[in-house]
Image (tube, rainbow, N blue to C red):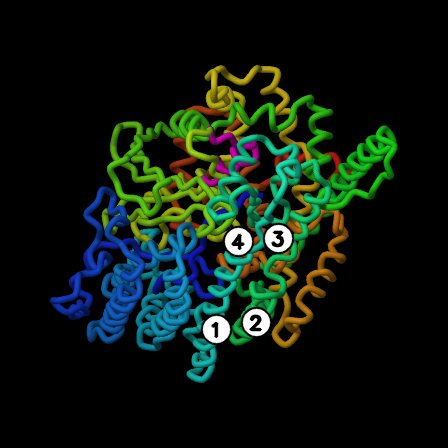
Amino acid sequence: MQASIQRISACGLMLTIGTGLMGCDVGTKPNSSIATPTAATSPATAPSPFAQISSLPYNLPPFDKIKDSDFAPAFEQAMAQQRQEAAAIAKNPAAPTFDNTIVALERSGQMLTRVSDVFFNLTGSNTSPALDQVQQDVAPKLAAQNDAILLDPALFARVDQLYQQRAGLGLDPESLRLLERYHVKFVRAGARLSSADKDRLRALNQQISSLTTQFQQTLLKANNNGALVVDRLADLDGLPPERIAAAAQAAKSRNLEGKWVIPLQNTTDQAVLAQLKNRQLRERIYKASITRADGGSDDNVASVAQIVKLRAERATLLGYPNHAAYVLEDETAGTPAAVNRMLAQLAPAAAANAHKEAAEIQKLIDRQAKAAHTKPFKLQPWDWAFYAEQVRKARYNFDETQVKPYFELNHVLKDGVFYAAHELYGVTFKERSDLPVYQQDVRVFEVSNADGSPLGLYLFDGFARDNKQGGAWMNSYVYQSLLFGTKPVVSNNINIPKPPAGKPVLLTFDEVNTIFHEFGHALHGLFSNVQYPMFAGTQVPEDFVEYPSQFNEMWSHNPQVLAHYAKHYKTGKPMPRALMEKVLAAHKFNAGFETSEYLAAAILDQAWHQLPAGQTPSATEVMDFEAQTLQKTGGEGYVVPPRYHTQYFQHIFASGYSAGYYAYIWSDVLAKDTEHWVNTHGGLKRANGDLLRAKILSRGFSEDPSALFKDFYGRGPDVGPLLEARGMAQTAKTQ
């Protein structure tokens, strides 16, 4: 599964406590009905770059004027402003109205939104020791700020009064939903608790915020410190030249001339394992991957124990049996039981397919050992990708080294990703080199509608760096809002190894698919067309947010799109038809392994967060609990490990997907249904894209996601297309 949206867990009033789901306002001038604070800076102090909305096109943050030292004072000033704005709403002597309470809340905290959107995006994509320190300092303060507003009894009284009167207010559907969502937000944040319980909740929220920040920062250090240093070039036999060059460049950047460094990716499985012939090195890399952040100076295990304990206690305080029940109540899934049923339905078929794949790989290992007159060995996790690639080569008569020359980054981006978006939605892209960026490799594209009207900005940050979180994600720097008249500025972050200057950037097909996936999130943000920023773009439940991105993956292997972007980087000639057909035929290959590793992680997430208060393991019991959970899944055990082990499972312990990692498979049901619908309605054509944009991609969270899908698809979701796409349909019938 691909990585996803970077959920920012601290961004002012619109934070949904517990899930980390960001719903920040976009910046504009404060409403005149809200008190404006006095200036927080003296005349001798330079004004904050966040004090006013950016004057750059599309309100792009002025990255060239923002310094690390700007953030701490900007947060202080912005939080003070928001507190004054919230107090003015709460103490307004006029009777509560939709405008003076709900819309006023929606307009509040704009400077804090500007600071937060830039800061937390940079701590993920381009951090520094100074930013890390600010994050540690500000995380508990933002949690306290959020609680100060959402637990204010006077403020909640106004919201609750309007909620009770909502049927008679004459609100349009989106405004009515805004009122209802604010009420839900206050109640779920603890607005109905006693004063004593509110005090305990505040303490819990601040502790959890600090611990999740610590987890994120420790993991980045663990990833960097866990990188493998290779002394001999011969040990890299099997890696393509561009990856060897990237490893040499990584070593050079660490002052390790004459050596090679293989960085760790976020996931358990490491991409180089599919190509490295040296089995001992493969084992070293795999073990470095699964042991990072487990003990030593980069330990995350103790943080996990505390986070799980505190989340469970908070859920009990809020009236829920466990953290998962609290989170899932506000997702389309609804309950832990619904998630458990879905995972249980898919796991046996995935495991059965993985067993078949393992048996085929073991036969290959045994045949090769017999031919070489060597002792055979039992398939291990660090062997799977290497031998699976050989099985694929034998079955489809091609391997990654044959196709990579046809997947050059610029061709993939412009002739693939942008081309598909143009054909489906009519949008066009113009690169802007005149706008400031936060890192020299970041590219900026202005996006326009088919009629030439401006749509927004798209930032592409493609390369891995030591100060960048692993994985791939989308985030927003500016959210669309008709209320504020703002257009979206969105970013995709990928972690492609950067080759030396002048060398081509050649991608694996998995990397190609990742770019299409993340761009689906970008389109969700760019096409947003809502009144209120709370509902803009990707600010939807986790089990719906992955739907547009996973749907967009279909274009990576669509024959028409593939033919348009798969061009040899030297000759420009298209990929031969026979090779293209092999790529398409191999699309379902290894689906048992890939689905099993994902499901193991999703089950692990639920196991952690369905624990009730008082029954969570101590730090010394964390890894034993994980092992026991994985044994109960009935999967492939150690041959197919979970996509993330607990101590580096950033999605659930630092990025807002706690009890929500199941969302990828839940959303993929919707995505595969939509892919089936598109293919049966003419494929890549504007009419299909226009309908999808109108009914799904432009609506954000302005309507219930299940209703949006039914309105588009004509009925509820069907798991059949997903099982078919993963090669599991026949297996599922026999389970």
N-terminal-most mark, 3 or 1: 1
- Label 1 SS: helix
* Cβ–Cβ under 8 Å for marks 3 and 1: no
Image coordinates for residue 276, horizontal then vertical, percent? 66, 37
Query: In the image, is 641 to the left or to the right of 525?
Result: right
Residue furthest to the left in view is 43
> Vertically, is 264 above or below 91?
above
Q: Which residue is mark 2?
A: 306
* Cβ–Cβ under 8 Å for marks 4 and 3: no
N-terminal-most mark, 2 or 1: 1
Query: Quarter-wise, where is residue 235 in the image?
Result: top right
Residue appearing at x 31%, y 44% in the figure: 437
Along the line of sight, the residue nearer the viewer: 64 or 58: 64
So how many labels did they put on this image?
4
**Is residue 74 something that shows in the picture?**
yes
In the rendered structure, which amino acid carries the disc numbered 3? Tyr
In the rendered structure, which amino acid carries the disc numbered 4? Asn
Q: Which mark is residue 224?
A: 4
N-terminal-most mark, 2 or 4: 4
Number of other residues with Cα within 10 Å of mark 1, as a class: few under 14, some 14 to 19, many 20 or more: some
- Span highlighted in magenta in the image: 504-518
